[in-house]
Image (cartoon, coloured by chain):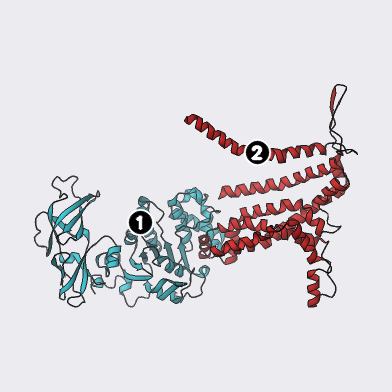
Amino acid sequence: MSAFLSRFALRGRSLVTAVPLLWLGLFFLLPFAVLAKISLSEAAIARPPYLPIWDWADGVLSFAFNIGNYLFLIEDPLYLMAYLGSVKIALISTAITLLIGYPMAYVIARAPQHRRNLLLMLVILPFWTSFLLRVYAWIGFLKGNGVINNVLMWLGVINEPLVMLQTDFAVYLGIVYSYLPFMILPLYTALVKLDEALLEASADLGARPFSTFWHITLPLSLPGVIAGAMLVFIPAVGEFVIPALLGGPNTLMIGSVLWNEFFSNRDWPVAAAVAIVMLVVLVLPIAVLRRAQSREEEAN
Amino acid sequence: MMTQANLAKGLKPWNDPAAAPFVQIKNVTKKFGTYTAVNDVSLDIYRGELFCLLGGSGCGKSTLLRMLAGFEGPTSGQILIDGEDQAGVPPYKRDTNMMFQSYALFPHMSVEKNIAYGLKRDGVPRAEIATRVTEMLSLVQLDQFAARKPHQLSGGQRQRVALARSLIKRPKLLMLDEPLGALDKKLREETQFELIKIQESLGVTFVVVTHDQEEAMTLSSRLGVMTAGKIVQIGTPHDIYEYPQTRFVADFIGSVNMFEGRIKDDCEDHATIHSADAGIDILVSHGITGVEGQQVAVAVRPEKIAISRTAPVGLPNVVPATVEEVAYMGNLSVFRVVLASGKRVKISQANLLRSDDDAIAAGEAVFLGWAGAASVVVMA
């Protein structure tokens, strides 16, 4: 009886781990394999718009892998520029979110217990409105006769409207605004765990407030910084909606290129290759950060 | 007063009116909202002392210590260290260091870096830091563990890192918040003597906060007993134990038998207290400042009462009793007896023999006896 029970328990445990594995397999690995397959095929005017990678004729099964799509990405500088542009915009946005998010998270973590939940609520509150609508609302603020320009002109600060919409500035603003909560929450989690006695000990040993921050608070909140940076950087690289709505013709990001390849050019194989390369570009920094983070956790 | 009378004057700085106190706490009050944590405390601590603040949780002892370190400012009153007013002086500008109850070791730094932290912040040259850290490591016997992180150490080792870190800047005043709280009994006793040794060899003034009366008795040159934000008695461990001034102090330090009574006779060198509790007039061999008929209590420590089957000769205070219970504690046997009045009394007796067939057992009728110098009158 007990043997049966323990076997049942064992099966229950493997079931629990099987569900997420199945989920990942079904909704990540399988589509990824399909994408990889498409990226190796040849474009065609057909439905779907690419040729199969294998052929069965006269009893011969032949495979044709077309790596031309990948070569094309190297040949045309547009793609490299778009990748670099995305990484640059994502990096700068991550840095700005960190600079804005850290003090906010710090204040929330040091606030009295009963006020923390309210402040956290305020951070999460924007999620109650659709992401698309919130980005769209920025157009109303930034455009030539938008809220900001009107207020500034009414105050007499400027004489003619500032060009803000359809610039890189608007893209940075949109990304920082949208992803700020993803930076604040992990930072808060790291900072709220910080023992107040450590800060007192540091002050007691002669460290001025900034020195205490630099030597104690910052190193101990590093796991939060890494987690927050990943949560902002990764989606920002592949961001499509924000540059499409707020960016201008000069804003070159890989998300828009991907969209164009799929929907305007209907070149699915090249689009698939762009997506695969983007994944590889993203996996690299993630792996590096993950290693840094696990080392940090080991140390503590 | 009796408390001071039996101490050799001049040997102890607190008895020398000319001696300048190193730490002066003057009428300090600390309020958190409507709650008064420290209530009008005045206290002088002298250079080279090992002063213990003893009290239960919430008595204000830690708040007082935090005010000395500069983490809290007094609501009213003044704190002087080495003659300098500490009002508005932040912790990082004070020549004091603190060993935290939780040790507060920096988890991301090795033992070595933890100890060096204070010197690095002061910009001490690298070579000097290295030698002083090495010295400190050997003082606390942690040479082997310099490269370890705090989480790789045992509780006792962490405690020694914390001590080394707080000593390395050679503070004028070292504060220790429940320094031995997290250690087991054996390690505690060892560390107590180590602390005293370090304190004597370095000559640093120590202020120790503890709730453990045994710790306070062993460590301190003097101790202050605190309750409800006030210091109720200051004295040497001997004073506090043998001459408690209030019921609270008598009860808090060690165990005690209290006989309620009224002053019957009060002379210069002795007094008698009529106690219905004890059923006799208790002779106390010290004078008291009270009026006849005043309600007081006589405190007698359990180890100062003799227990025997026949009435003891030569002792002024003799009371018949019946043994209710005998508890064997190894080094001691503790007798719980009941008097004719129904009052229960505790007596402890050293077990001089390994086994005693003639030992007094539960249910026996016995006599209790104690000397006039064994008891002390507490007024409040």
- Tell me the kind of residue under disc 2: Leu
Q: Mark 2 points at which residue?
A: A21
Q: Do the residues labelled 2 and 1 touch (CB within 8 Å)?
A: no
Task: Name the residue at the right extreme.
Answer: A45
Residue depicted at x 31% and y 75%: B16
Chain letter for the cyan colouring in the rendering: B
Left or right, B69 with respect to A34, comes to left
Cα separation, mark 2 vs mark 1, equals 59 Å
Could one spot residue B35 in this view of the protein? Answer: yes
- The residue nearer to you, when weighing B162 against A136, is A136
B103, above or below B280, in the image: above
Q: Mark 1 points at which residue?
A: B193
Q: Residue A239: x and y, percent? A: 77, 53
Q: Quadrant of residue A178?
A: bottom right
Q: Residue A65: x and y, percent? A: 84, 33
Q: Which of marks 2 and 1 is in front?
A: 2
Chain A, colour shown: red
Which SS class for mark 1? helix
Residue depicted at x 56% and y 53%: B108
Image mark 1: chain: B
Could one spot residue B203 in this view of the protein? Answer: no
Image mark 2: chain: A
Circle 2 packing at 10 Å, graded few (<14), some (14-19), many (20+), is few
Q: Which numbered tag is attached to residue B61?
A: none
